[in-house]
Amino acid sequence: MVKVENKETLRLLTKRFMKMNRARNIIAVIAIMLTSLLFTSLFVGGSVSMILSKRATEIKQFMDSSHAIAQNLSEEDAERLQKTIEQDEDVERYGSGIFLGAGMDERFGFSVEVRYADENMAESYNCLPTTGRLPEKENEVALSSTILESLGVTPKIGGEEVTLTWEVNPMLKQYKTDTFRICGFWQGGDKAVLGQMVWVSKAYAKENRYPVTQEELENGIYNGGKEYSVWYKNLWNLEKKTEKISKAAGFTRAGSGMEVNPAYNLFEEDSFSFTSLIVMVLFVILAGYLIIYNIFNISVKTDIRAYGLLKNVGTTGKQLKKIVRMQAWRLSAIGIPIGLLCGYLAGLCMAPSLNADAAISAQTGKTAQTVVSANPLIFLAAILLTLLTVYLSSLQACKMVERVSPVEALRLAEGEQSHRKIKKNTSVTWWGMAVQNVLRNWKKGLIVMLSIALSMVVVNCIVMLVQGYDFDSYRKVFLASDFQLDQMTGSLSNTNFNGITPEIKEILDECLIVLRQDMCIILKKPTRWSRNF
């Protein structure tokens, strides 16, 4: 037997087989496209979008984009921690700041904090000036346009002077008032966040900060406390990295030292479930495998005579297997790009519905954001998983053509032809033919039915994710009233208990009085609705 080594010949044979099976090619491309679509939409709309949206929402809510934070530190603790951070190899960069006190002004209808921050710290608070710069001189200040508007000052560099009063010590009721010149500001500023920032210079902060002691910090006086924001080189093992820095800096007491930003904690109780993602991926692989497996098996059995003849003239089993594999790769080259595009578009449509946390935040008045990523790694993962599915699906077909002998191929082909003739001459009903066909090869029928059933399970899971969230059930547990007005957060340390000012309470009381008067007028009218009411 002469072994054929010509690669061009194998490519030509692959091309001929694909021309012989045009209908098979269309069905296989559709199956591969659907598998790729499911993987891409699952990653884009489900896992990655849910993680990024939750992170973006909590970064806005907690006003911190750094990986780890340390707050309310005394001078000694701050010096030890800074030395440790500078020597740690995992740290990419860090920022430092000083909390001076809360802004005190009747015109503020929201929380205002006076602080010093370097550029990295201001960035972590998402309050970096977009116009101008951070303060460098003692009489300079940078703040949001929201604060300036509440003070009646036009946002302009070097314009009107700004007079600010801030609380030096809440226990002793000490206040300080100073006048500053605007050196920088940023537009907007969400009033629903924890607080509006006012940045002062480092020299001013050192001179005017309250000399808080460790005992006072433990008793809840945070004015004058130092803080740090840390960014690591990557997001792996944030807990271990942060714990290592805290121990090296000498923080052994619970609740002291550094802690991971809650926005980056993906393993909380209400965070994204990686187990669900793995289960969904396995379902997609299994469903795609069974569909593509059936297509290639049927195709190989149809062309078994041609494969037997090729083996008879000198083609080896490995070369026949390569022909089948090359057909699978060519079909994948057509189906996968189409599936990636359709999957990304499907993910864009699915993301708003799948992000339950963002939906809850938006409807309860918190800052919400839906993020859809087009990271190349997402598409690379979808491509690799689809190719893995195609590879596994073609294994059985490759083994069949590798092991088949010319005589067996001829017998199988003649058996199929004779069986088809018997079918034509036998007068049975269509459902009888279907039952006989299934019973004749019940294993093949079981695989076909299982592949269809798993495909429906995957579709049903996606529909459940999109439409399975019931906001009314959430509202009954966490929000009994029609609306709620506060600045409460999921973390006690970041909660503003004075978010509702006396002025806001007066406005609400006036609204309630007007609402009651309107209801009385409506109920006095002899309408069917009022009688039932």
Image (spheres, rainbow, N blue to C red):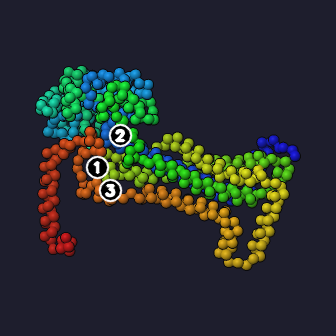
Q: Nearer the viewer, residue 102 or 512?
A: 102
Dot 1 falls on a residue whose secondary structure is: loop
Give the residue at mark 3: 474
- What separation in Å lies between label 1 and label 3 (alpha carbons)? 14 Å
**Which amino acid type corresponds to the residue marked 2 in the rendered image?**
Pro
Give the residue at mark 1: 365
Res 404 → quadrant: bottom right
As drawn, 84 above or below 518:
above
Res 511 → quadrant: bottom left
Q: Is the Cβ of the residue at disc 3 closer than 8 Å to that at disc 2?
A: no
**Which amino acid type corresponds to the residue marked 3 in the rendered image?**
Tyr
Q: Compare marks 3 and 2 and give the one earlier in the sequence.
A: 2
Q: Which residue occupies the extreme right position in the image?
A: 1
As drawn, 199 above or below 265:
above
**Which amino acid type corresponds to the residue marked 1 in the rendered image?**
Gly
- Which mark lies nearer to you, 1 or 2? 2
Q: Residue visible at 39% across and 39% down?
A: 264
**x and y percent of residue 233 in the render?**
44, 30
Q: Residue visible at 22% across and 30% down?
A: 217
Label 1 crowd (10 A; few <14 / some 14-19 / many >=20) = some
- What separation in Å lies between label 1 and label 2 (alpha carbons)? 20 Å
